[in-house]
Image (cartoon, grey):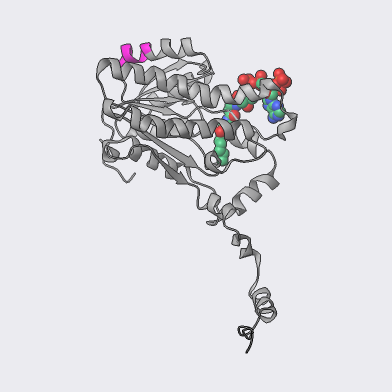
Amino acid sequence: MIFRDDLLQDKVILVTGGGTGLGRQMAETFGRLGAKLALVGRRADVLEQARVQMQAQNLTVWVHPLDIRMPDAVDQVMDEIFMHYGKLDVLVNNAAGNFISPTERLSPRAVDAVINIVLHGTMYCTLAAGKRWIARGEPGTVLNITTTYAWTGSGYVVPSAVAKAGVLAMTRSLATEWAPHHIRQVAIAPGPFPTQGAWSRLMPTEELANAAQNRVPLKRVGRPEELTTLAAYLVSDAAAYINGEVVTIDGGEWLYGAGMFNGLDRLTQDDWDRMRELMPKKSSPKMGE
Ligand code: HXC
């Protein structure tokens, strides 16, 4: 850990989807840095297991089952967090839903399943926290987990792309609207960070997983601690002047896809020699010369 042990001392941090995957890993990092944790997710048994295991590490954890698609339930749980800890400092909108599919195969229910979690759920949680912070005159920080295809778009995950683009717009919009209330918005756009929940739906074959890794200029996937360290910094007071910013952490993956000639990394030195032979050796004579 590159930080002082008390970086997040006594900050109350709510992580949605906090019982598994990157949500849980972020929460554990925050807890080790002194934060008091509130974890919500759809499955009570998974949350309970996380609570027991994290308390065994002497972390302060409170858990509650919550489907963030239910605005009334979100409001209720938010009240319980304020009652339990007396405040909330940080909301981490981590919960997401996604799977790969040709778009024309999606049913309306499939579209809703993703957009209701990623866009509506994220907005319900942000609203519930923001309303309370504003009413109480207290500061707050929202960390949204978005993705690089929020700005490029991506085929085969269209509901997710649509929803994550909305989350990005929300991050930037509220960064200005709620700044006078001392509520900060930050976001992380992760590239490939394999977790069971995501990879079982996005990279169901080894071939797809290898192809994803090979698209990364650094030729590897992300390590959880690389993301959790960034998250801890962004929600800490050290980042107090960062507002409305999205930090990409993808090993250069999205730029690789964007740069027209980046695929030339496949060429060998012999290929380059042949290519040079095919190119003009000096500029052609100008007209009239
Ligand atoms: C086509 C599918 C489908 C699939 C579900 N559906 N999976 N359609 N292909 N693979 C359809 C169903 O048939 C159904 O429509 C509708 O979606 C709802 O399905 P349910 O299973 O009832 O939904 P629900 O239980 O609410 O589950 C939501 C979910 C699921 C999103 C579908 O995958 C889920 O719970 N995911 C949570 C975890 C997760 O996805 N993590 C990954 C996040 S990764 P019909 O019409 O048949 O009833 C991420 C990272 C992005 O976001 C960046 C990566 C680099």
Q: Is residue 31 visible?
A: no
Along the viewing direction, whichever of 86 and 177 lies nearer the viewer: 177
Q: Is residue 206 above or below residue 85?
A: below
Of residues 105 and 89, the one drawn nearer to the viewer in this rendering = 105
260 with respect to 86 (left or right): right
Q: Magenta residues, as a range? A: 79-85
Q: Position of residue 216 (x, y in %)?
A: 56, 53
Front-lying residue, 115 or 10: 115
Quarter of the image that includes the N terminus: top left
The residue lying at 32 percent from left, 21 percent from top is: 88
Expressed as whole percent of the image width and height from the top left, the position of residue 170 reads 44, 30
Taking the image as shown, residue 205 lies to the left or right of residue 169, namely right
Q: Quadrant of residue 260?
A: bottom right
- Residue ID at (58%, 32%): 162
Quadrant hosting ligand 1: top right
Please name whichever residue, 151 or 74, is drawn nearer the observer in this view of the structure.
151
Dominant secondary structure of the residues highlighted in magenta in the image: helix
- In the rendered view, would you say 157 is above or below 119? below
Image coords of residue 104 (percent x, y): 74, 31
Q: Residue at x 70, y 41 (%)?
A: 205
